[in-house]
Image (cartoon, grey):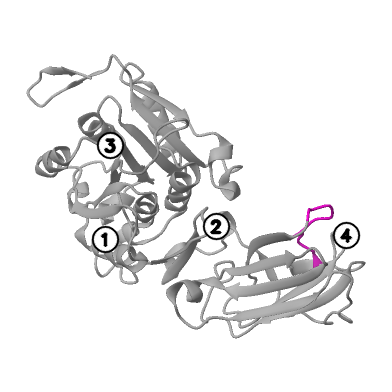
Amino acid sequence: IADDVCEPLIRRGTPLPASETKLFTTTQDSQTAAWFEVYAGERPFCNGNRFLGSVALSPLPTPSYRSFVQLEVIAEIDESGHVRVEASEIESRALGDPFCNGVLETDLLGFGGSPPESREGREVALFSHALAKHLPVLLATRTVRLPSGQDIVIRQHQRREKEKIGTGGVLWESAIVLADYVARNGTMTSGGPGWKGRKVLELGAGTGLVAIALALQGSEVVATDGNAKVLDGAAVNIEGIGETPGTVKLEVFDWNSEEDLKRIQQMGPWDAIVGSDLVYPGNAGRHCVASNATTHPADATLLRIFDELAGPSTQVILALKDRTGEVGRFVEQVNQLHDRWTMRRAPPEAVMPEFRAIEAVAVLQLSKTQNSSIETKTGCKADQ
């Protein structure tokens, strides 16, 4: 990969037959080709390892931004030492469009001659959503690979300002983390029931990725957003997946509307309530939902919604990114309500690997305490 570094795929001592898959990406904007050199050896740099051959991918989709194009490499070795390496550009493949593909077949003890003298304009690097070098708002589409290996292509709104969609038409890191979390763990909480057949309410559905991940797990999802145009975009992405074991229903839910709140309550009870980036810096939400112009878009409003919609056994699962201290503020508010809510942070091993060491991204699990009570609109108390 870049800087003459070798990225291990199948390590010495691995029982054969063996197979390994990794995702790589481009290192330049609008890069038209990628070159994968295959070596046998254990040294960290290409020099000193035995060159077996190479796989070329061209032409790559352009225009594009470096670090967002995803290139899949699958390496296989059988019992006889036969090596097969296949590389593909995966977003076009997932969309059913023509895509770049290349294959190298050789032997583990073979020799591929001399490696190319120059890799200029064709170098690659490991792909990571956590290390993307451009804001995702610049892209028409983004591709997310779920733990099952299924690639989900998400189309983003390209006229957000004109249509007053704001941040809701963009796929952000927290949504990727939450979608991965529900798919990776396969249960509502550690040791809890599976997602299949569970009624799940999603707040702030955005591009629809989390709802898609839940539907693939068999959940009955009601995905909500305060902006109907955001839901139009989510509908396109959800319909693009085709049939799923579960279902997704889209509903407009303005957090500041008592009428909307009552309607969502009547659709329950909810086994789980999920959401990503529901607290955010400054007035970001004011560009997404008209009523936010006069009401704070998150925090206290969000906790009130949880009080109204969550039952005694409802699990609330949130993926949040701390940009300017808003996550810490939200956690502090929840901790002040310890007589009503319990909260824990998901352990690193339950989170998408590339985000495990990033403190700013948190997956929080909330549930009502057994002796909690809430004030209803009439001022009476209802035991939960």
Q: Which residue is mark 3?
A: 302
Mark 4 residue type:
Arg
Q: Decide: is 88 above or below 10.
A: below
In the rendering, at what x and y percent does residue 50 appear? Answer: 89, 70
Secondary structure at badge 2 equals: helix
Mark 3 vs mark 2: in front: 2
Q: Earlier in the sequence, mark 1 or mark 3?
A: 1
Q: Which residue is mark 2?
A: 129
> Which residue shows up at 42% across the image and 31% down it?
192
Res. 329 image quadrant: top left
Mark 4 vs mark 3: in front: 4
Mark 3 residue type:
Leu
Q: Is residue 71 left or right of residue 247?
A: right
Q: Which residue is mark 4?
A: 43
Of residue 51 and residue 278, the one placed in the foreground of this image is: 51
Mark 4 vs mark 1: in front: 4
Question: Which residue of the protein is positioned furthest toward the bottom in this rendering?
Answer: 59
